[in-house]
Amino acid sequence: MERKTWIIIGAGVLAFGGVLSLFQDSDDSTADAKPRETRSAAVTPHKSTAEPSTPTTGSGVPTPDAQQRAALIRALTAVDAGLVTKEDRAVSRARSTCLDIKQGKEASAVQSNTKQRFEGGTVPTITDAQATAIVAAVKTSFCS
């Protein structure tokens, strides 16, 4: 390349770097005190409130034992075999439904949340009857 081209490229790179520096933190004292990784690790992503909640470990939501899990998987398979393609995911979603039940949510909300949780992938749509059957499976297998 010609020298003129290199000069133009270099000037562009410097200008781009200058623009980027405008978007960085203006307080350099904190940059020296804390590494950037520590500051960004403290930021938590925003979770939409429209999504059904997922229980966390120690949330008080029962976890099915081996026998209860087997009963849950059998009941979900009877509703639609696609619901248990990934058993751990199905159990996690069932625990979320149990959380809704334990929180005393209205039956219509529990059914709607359950429908949202279990739809997709191998089961693109779930009917209201299937959602009702899933809630019943959760209640009878481990969430009484």
Image (cartoon, helix red, strand yellow):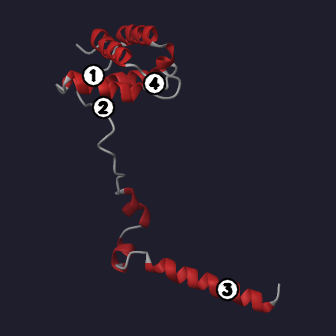
Q: State the SS at label 1.
A: helix
Q: Amino acid at mark 1?
A: Cys
| Res. 51 in view | yes
Give the foreground label among 2 and 4: 4
Does 17 sit left or right of 98 as displayed? right
Residue positioned 41% across, 67% down in the render: 35
Q: State the SS at label 2.
A: loop
Q: x%, y% of residue 12?
A: 63, 84
Q: Amino acid at mark 3?
A: Gly
Placement of 105 over or under 75, stated as above or below: below
The residue identified by callout 4 is: 125
Determine the CA span between mark 1 and mark 3. 60 Å
Q: Amino acid at mark 2?
A: Pro
Q: Amino acid at mark 4?
A: Thr
Lower sequence index among marks 2 and 4: 2
Residue positioned 36% across, 52% down in the render: 45
The residue identified by callout 1 is: 98
Q: Residue 55: give its label.
A: 2
